[in-house]
Amino acid sequence: MKFGGTSVGSSESIQQVVEIINQEQGQKIVVLSAFSGVTNLLVQLNNQYQEGNQDVLQTLQQLESRCFEVVNPLFQTATFLQVAQNFVRLKIEEIKTLVQQAYQESHTKTIIAQGEIISTHIFQFFLQEKKIESSLISALDFMVLDKNQEPDTLLISKNIQSILKKEEKSIFITQGFICRDFFGNISNLDRGGSDYSASLIGAAVSAEQIQIWTDIDGMHNNDPRYVENTFSIKEVSFDEAAELAYFGAKILHPQSLIPAKNNNIPVLLKNTFSPAQKGTLIKNSTVNDGVTSVAAKDGITAIKIKSYRMLLAYGFLKKVFEVFETYQTPIDMITTSEVAVSLTIDNNEYLSEIVENLQEFGTVEVDKNLSIVCVAGDFSQNKEGISAQVFNALKTIPIRMISYGGSNYNVSLLVKTAHKVEALNALNAQLFKHQLAALEA
Ligand code: ASP
Ligand code: MG
């Protein structure tokens, strides 16, 4: 059971988390994020430390206040309150000692790890105060990366199994996000990585289920920030969920599904603040067919390379791709014609270098401020009419590129960002007619 930053972000929400955990039968591993806002403060603090900015001590003060904001109202007894406050003070002192030394890269990871170390300890103290038996196990003792900075799944599994064997507890508490690298130094799984931790841990112990508790009712059929009538999806396949995690659906860290999928462990997305809602179940085989959801991603740049040398030639695409490889820029969408190829990227860091290199092959046009609108679902039955419905919904919106058939799980359309909200709403009305009518009834 993984609880995100907002779920542990206040004393009320922590109490809610304890109730949720208590209601779940069987053995549980509880994976926690840092209190909301804390990792951001730690990143800010580390940047100031690195730049030699004196404001670092002020940020440290803010960090302490943020922790006390959660801790002070949480405890009922003076003894436990004291234990918890002392722990926060100790961590703040440790960070202070680090940032008063000359900058070292290794300090960065140690500093950023403190958010999860604090939240898990406070949580464990709270369970102790409530006389709920649990054991706090350190992710730094089992979550390890290999030489390529990827989680070492075999070793993680071996480590955690031997730790769990030592104690007959029904609740284990541990940190999300943090780990050790191949050399044993403190590291992490990148921002938002607690979901990934939960999935890796679930896979390592062959869990029955992985639950990700956040502050929304699971994945929605469309982006609730731009579309009024959205509803949460009951069930979705790993493949569709992976398409959506990359697009607007910020609810999940995109990599986090891989260990769960590989080990065939269902992932349940739930809302801490509304636990009665069913949430979204992600699993290998689902009952859906047809469209499940629509999402969008902004900040897309399209690049078109036009060249008559492409006509009847082979090896052209390889040369084009090599340019992107050199600049380590992933390509998202691609379409080709006999004399042109269009593709999109979402990272413009090396755009000018890329364009300069591509000009060797032909004329290059660049278009910015675009959005990819992704219609995800199970189209493996090659459902008659899905593409017709998509185009019908978007008949008034100029579409710059279309990608269909790359997987059975999505149709992607490239539009101007200025048209995104209109596109999402038009698709909502057209593709979810029946569900929306049922909701109203
Ligand atoms: N606390 C980390 C972050 O804010 C990891 C997480 O919450 O998933 O990125
Ligand atoms: Mg998160």
Image (cartoon, rainbow, N blue to C red):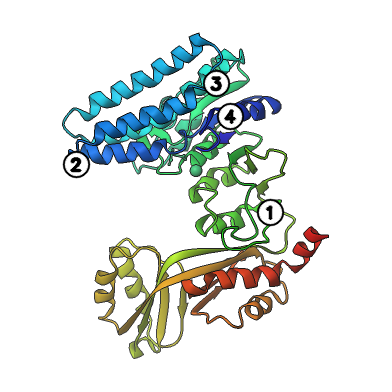
Q: Is residue 168 above or below residue 412?
A: above
Can the viewer see residue 199 in this picture?
yes
| Residue at the disc numbered 3 | 164
Identify the image quadrant of the C terminus: bottom right
According to the image, label 4 marks what residue? 12
- Mark 4 to mark 1 CA distance (whole Å): 28 Å
Mark 3 or 1, nearer chain start: 3
Disc number lying in front (2 or 4): 4
The quarter of the picture where residue 363 lies is bottom left
Q: Secondary structure at mark 2?
A: helix
Where does label 1 land, which residue? 233
Spatial separation of the CA atoms under disc 3 and disc 1: 34 Å
The residue under the point 60% across, 15% down is: 130
**Mark 1 C-beta closer than 8 Å to ligand 2:** no
> Ligand 1 within 8 A of label 2's CB?
no
Q: Amino acid at mark 1?
A: Ile
Judge from the rendering whether residue 18 lies leftward or rightward of residue 81; answer left or right: right
Residue 51: which numbered mark, if any? 2
Closer to the camera: disc 3 or disc 1? 1
Neighbourhood count class around disc 4 (C-alpha, 10 Å): few under 14, some 14–19, many 20 upward? few
Q: How many marks?
A: 4
Q: Residue 404's x, y, as percent?
A: 57, 73
Q: What distance separates the C-alpha of mark 1 from that of mark 2?
A: 45 Å
